Image (cartoon, rainbow, N blue to C red):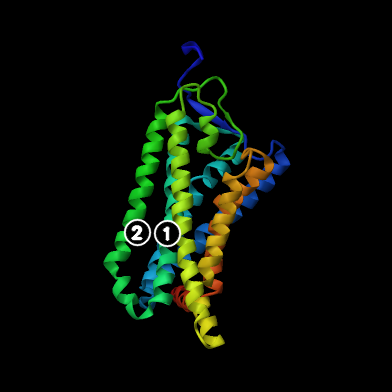
């Protein structure tokens, strides 16, 4: 590509889902409702855990961080999409696109690491119950979360800085509803080899290592549960990790749907992206609250205090 055909792009165009004005109105109301439920549900989980001393345990500490990451994860894409629908504009500035990609990678990575840490927490609780409080001490819990943040922030920063060196041709159209890294890379005129190498390395790292950790933890958990003699004991042990297992299945199932899709800009690919980036964070609070008595009790206390104040 000749240097004359390369330029520093000022903005990208996000095509989104539909060009029809009636469909745009429906999409706006749908995504606004889902976003409101996601933010409200996850914030309620955070408030409930923070306000109840009985929930100041490693499992709920990680859940609180997961809820925060989910709110931020959804907030990186949905608000901009709602603004574009409302203003009938499809543009996003070059700087805004880079920032969106950065935070999308940060909080997507945090979800992955936190789910792995939570699997380890359940492994220790079920397989080594007598040593649980010693192993999962506050220092280790804080260190695990800090390591998750550091890894996510570092990779996202490196990938974003590598994006800044790229030049783009005259095609600045992204056939998606947010700035997806792989889609933006296809628009670049300059050499993207380093970007793709890092991208595939991190996808492998974030996909294989955490998933292997989760698989190992649940293999040991299932093995320990099967050795419990009573049916009631097996049910009680399994119920402590059922919510987490449901969230892991939903997160990795939709995530694989996105990254294994042959064309993420197709209608099927974008639906998978919606499930991964919007629907999963919305469902997490319901999964944990509906299947957890401690969370239900804490939520009743929070709602009770709110009603008393009013």
Residue 145 visible somewhere in the drawing: yes
Could you tell me how far apart the alpha carbons at marks 2 and 1 are, in whole angstroms?
7 Å
Task: Give the residue pinned by disc 1.
Answer: 114
User: Where residue 43 is drawn, which disc sits there?
Assistant: none
Answer above or below: position of 156 versus 69.
above
Q: Which of the two labelled residues, at mark 2 and mark 1, occupies the earlier sequence position? A: 1
Closer to the camera in the image, 166 or 121:
121
- The spot of residue 268 in percent (x, y) is 68, 44
- The spot of residue 172 in percent (x, y) is 55, 26
Secondary structure of residue under mark 1: helix
Assess disc 2: are there few (<14), some (14-19) or many (≥20) residues with their C-alpha within 10 Å of its C-alpha: some
Answer above or below: position of 38 versus 24.
below
Which residue shows up at 52% across the image and 46% down it?
79
- Outermost left residue: 139
Answer above or below: position of 242 versus 183.
below
Evaluate if marks 2 and 1 touch, with contact meaning CB atoms under 8 Å apart.
Answer: yes
Which residue shows up at 72% across the image and 37% down it?
20
How many numbered markers are drawn? 2
Which residue shows up at 36% across the image and 37% down it?
158
Q: Is residue 280 left or right of residue 47?
A: right
- The spot of residue 288 in percent (x, y) is 52, 69
Which residue shows up at 45% across the image and 76% down it?
298
Q: Is residue 274 left or right of residue 240?
A: right
- The spot of residue 199 in percent (x, y) is 46, 39
Closer to the camera in the image, 233 or 164:
233
Q: Is residue 49 left or right of residue 134?
A: right
Assess disc 1: are there few (<14), some (14-19) or many (≥20) residues with their C-alpha within 10 Å of its C-alpha: many
User: Where residue 145 is drawn, which disc sits there?
Assistant: 2
Secondary structure of residue under mark 2: helix
Residue 37 visible somewhere in the drawing: no
Q: Quadrant of residue 116?
A: bottom left
């Amino acid at each position: 590509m000749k240097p004359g055909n390369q330029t520093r792009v000022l903005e990208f165009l996000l095509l989104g889902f539909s060009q029809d004005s009636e469909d745009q109105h429906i999409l706006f109301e749908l995504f606004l409702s889902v976003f409101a439920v996601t933010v409200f549900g996850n914030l309620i989980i955070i408030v409930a855990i923070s306000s109840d001393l009985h929930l100041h345990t490693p499992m709920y500490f990680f859940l609180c961080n997961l809820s925060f990451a989910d709110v931020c994860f959804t907030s990186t894409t949905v608000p901009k999409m709602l603004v574009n629908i409302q203003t009938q504009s499809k543009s996003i500035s070059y700087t805004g696109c880079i920032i969106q990609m950065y935070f999308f990678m940060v909080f997507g990575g945090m979800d992955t690491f936190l789910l792995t840490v939570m699997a380890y927490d359940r492994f220790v609780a079920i397989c080594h119950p007598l040593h649980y409080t010693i192993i999962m001490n506050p220092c280790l819990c804080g260190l695990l979360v800090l390591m998750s943040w550091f890894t996510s922030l570092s990779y996202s920063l490196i990938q974003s800085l590598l994006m800044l060196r790229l030049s783009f041709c005259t095609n600045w159209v992204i056939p998606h509803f947010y700035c997806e890294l792989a889609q933006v890379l296809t628009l670049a005129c300059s050499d993207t080899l380093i970007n793709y190498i890092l991208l595939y390395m991190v996808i492998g790292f974030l996909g294989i290592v955490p998933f292997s950790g989760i698989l190992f933890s649940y293999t040991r958990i299932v093995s320990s549960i099967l050795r419990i003699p009573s049916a009631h004991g097996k049910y009680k042990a399994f119920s402590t990790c059922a919510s987490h297992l449901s969230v892991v299945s939903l997160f990795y199932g939709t995530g694989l749907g996105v990254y294994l899709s042959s064309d993420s800009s197709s209608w099927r690919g974008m639906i998978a992206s919606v499930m991964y980036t919007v629907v999963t964070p919305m469902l997490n609070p319901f999964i944990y609250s509906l299947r957890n008595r401690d969370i239900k009790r804490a939520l009743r206390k929070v709602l009770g205090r709110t009603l008393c104040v009013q």
